[in-house]
């Protein structure tokens, strides 16, 4: 079944799946970097699970499943991975302040992000200096003009100036703030189609894109579990026998 669903993604290449091509499942397209996506998702999930008590059955079950699937993903490396990893490590060593590294629990590389927001070009610096110089010149000119006004007009002009500044300040606060930094992921080489099929077979949960969707949902669920602290005692205790009807032995007892 899965092999037939992949036919559309294999139109252009027999060795690699075509990114964003239909998978055969409505609304689900071929992921361009499924291995890297799962490495980051599983690593992030495991890190966040540390915020839940070890006694939690949810944490124990989710950790076990996530670690099992992470091990499968880590064991499958795309062609050219070692060379790519070496190049990335050189970039990290050259610009340690401009990258963010995500490592799996085993120490393997899950993802490396380039923090582009920290870079300011010489042109941007010059524009900033010119704008600042113009602003200071304008302030000096306005102050000079204010001093030349008749004394009886100065209070009204000063009040108008304060109201204008306050109005502009409120307007700036209401405007959406543009994102100052942009994060780019160093994309690792693509997996071969046969490697993806092998991962899907080992995990046994459908297409790898479906596995990614489940991992994304699990990560969101972990956030919700932490937010609501579901491991804490209930504020309103259940009444005695409240859940008896739903017990496992209900059916056998009735017979």
Image (spheres, rainbow, N blue to C red):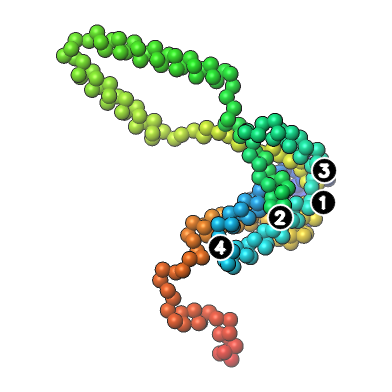
Q: Residues within 10 Å of mark 2 (few under 14, many from 20)?
A: many
Separation (CA) of disc 3 from disc 2: 19 Å
Residue named by callout 4: 53
Separation (CA) of disc 4 from disc 3: 40 Å
- Give coordinates of residue 106: x percent, y percent: 72, 52
Q: Residue at x 44, y 14 (%)?
A: 133
- Give coordinates of residue 126: x percent, y percent: 53, 16
Mark nearest the camera among 1 and 4 is: 4
Mark nearest the camera among 4 and 3 is: 4
Mark nearest the camera among 2 and 1 is: 2
Answer above or below: position of 66 versus 128: below
> Seen from this angle, which residue lies furthest top?
148
Residue named by callout 1: 194
Q: Residue at x 51, y 65 (%)?
A: 231
Residue named by callout 3: 79
Cβ atoms under marks 3 and 2 closer than 8 Å: no
- Give coordinates of residue 59: x percent, y percent: 60, 63
Q: Would residue 179 appear left or right of 110 to someone viewing this image?
A: left
- Secondary element at image label 3: loop
- Give coordinates of residue 196: x percent, y percent: 77, 51
Q: Earlier in the sequence, mark 3 or mark 1?
A: 3
Separation (CA) of disc 4 from disc 2: 21 Å
Cβ atoms under marks 4 and 3 closer than 8 Å: no
Q: Nearer the viewer, residue 231 or 8?
A: 231
Q: Earlier in the sequence, mark 4 or mark 2?
A: 4
Q: Residue at x 76, y 35 (%)?
A: 87
Separation (CA) of disc 2 from disc 1: 18 Å
Residue named by callout 2: 70
Q: Would residue 127 appear left or right of 239 to someone viewing this image?
A: right
Q: Earlier in the sequence, mark 3 or mark 2?
A: 2
> Seen from this angle, which residue lies furthest left?
152
């Amino acid at each position: 079944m899965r092999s037939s669903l992949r036919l559309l993604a294999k139109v252009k290449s027999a060795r690699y799946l075509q990114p964003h091509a239909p998978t055969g499942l409505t609304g689900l397209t071929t992921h361009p970097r499924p291995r890297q996506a799962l490495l980051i998702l599983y690593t992030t999930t495991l890190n966040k699970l540390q915020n839940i008590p070890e006694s939690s059955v949810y944490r124990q079950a989710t950790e076990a499943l996530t670690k099992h699937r992470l091990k499968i993903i880590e064991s499958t490396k795309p062609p050219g991975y070692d060379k790519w990893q070496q190049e990335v490590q050189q970039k990290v060593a050259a610009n340690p302040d401009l990258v963010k590294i995500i490592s799996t629990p085993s120490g393997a590389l899950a993802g490396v992000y380039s923090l582009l927001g920290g870079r300011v070009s010489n042109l941007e610096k010059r524009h900033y200096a010119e704008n600042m110089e113009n602003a200071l010149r304008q302030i000096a000119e306005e102050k000079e003009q204010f001093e030349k006004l008749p004394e009886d007009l100065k209070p009204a002009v000063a009040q108008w100036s304060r109201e204008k500044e306050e109005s502009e300040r409120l307007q700036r606060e209401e405007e959406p703030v543009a994102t100052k930094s942009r994060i780019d992921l160093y994309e690792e080489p693509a997996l071969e189609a046969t490697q993806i099929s092998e991962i899907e077979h080992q995990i046994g949960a459908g297409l790898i894109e479906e596995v990614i969707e489940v991992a994304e949902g699990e990560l969101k669920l972990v956030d919700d579990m932490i937010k609501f602290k579901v491991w804490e005692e209930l504020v309103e205790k259940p009444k005695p026998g409240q859940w008896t009807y739903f017990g496992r032995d209900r059916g056998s007892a009735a017979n």
